[in-house]
Image (cartoon, rainbow, N blue to C red):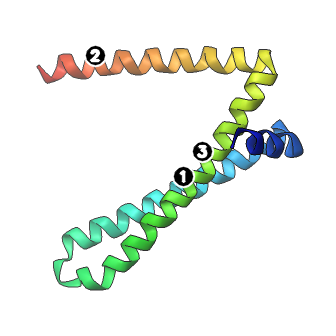
Amino acid sequence: MQNKIATIAEHYGLENQLTKMAEECAEYSASVLKCRFYADLVQTSRAKVKHFGPKADIAGEEMFKELADVMVLCRQIEYFMDTHPPFKARIEELMEEKCNRQLRRIEEEKRNAS
């Protein structure tokens, strides 16, 4: 699959694929919300489970398809990171900061839960 990822990435280029990533993330976000909507509806409307169950299943499958699209784009961005060291350094620096901040939040949550 890595060869396919590289071929697609090289064909479209970093700038286009960053824009495509935004589009695919938006579609994934919408699909997650739709999936949650049907799951909540099925859970709270017991009498209508048969009516909404198939829609929930379809929404779940669509969510997986959208996630696959996002993951394909993520791998393309990782490919570009490997071929553009300054881009990789900046993204990894920001990822490190975000991970550290989230770990601090987790520690705070643990302290507050005690």
Instruction: Establish if 6 lies above or below 63.
Output: above
The answer to which of marks 1 and 2 sits earlier in the sequence is: 1
User: In the current view of this chain or complex, which residue is farthest to the right?
Assistant: 11
- Give the residue pinned by disc 3: 71
Q: Secondary structure at mark 3?
A: helix
Q: Quadrant of the C terminus?
A: top left
Instruction: Establish if 16 lies above or below 94.
Output: below
Residue 7's spot in the image, x, y percent? 83, 43
Residue plotted at (77% across, 40% down): 3
Task: Say few, some or many: other residues with alpha carbon within 10 Å of mark 2 (under 14 / 14 to 19 / 20 or more).
Answer: few
Q: Amino acid at mark 2?
A: Glu
Q: Quadrant of the N terminus?
A: top right
Residue plotted at (49% across, 58% down): 64
Q: Secondary structure at mark 1?
A: helix
Residue 53's spot in the image, x, y percent? 31, 77
Q: Secondary structure at mark 2?
A: helix
- Give the residue pinned by disc 1: 67
Q: CA distance from mark 3 to mark 1?
A: 6 Å
- Give the residue pinned by disc 2: 107
Q: Are marks 3 and 1 in contact (CB under 8 Å)?
A: yes
Q: Amino acid at mark 1?
A: Leu
- Viewer-nearest of discs 2 and 3: 3
Instruction: Establish if 9 lies above or below 61.
Output: above
Q: Which mark is residue 37?
A: none
Instruction: Establish if 61 lies above or below 104.
Output: below
Q: CA distance from mark 2 to mark 3?
A: 29 Å
Q: CA distance from mark 1 to mark 2?
A: 29 Å
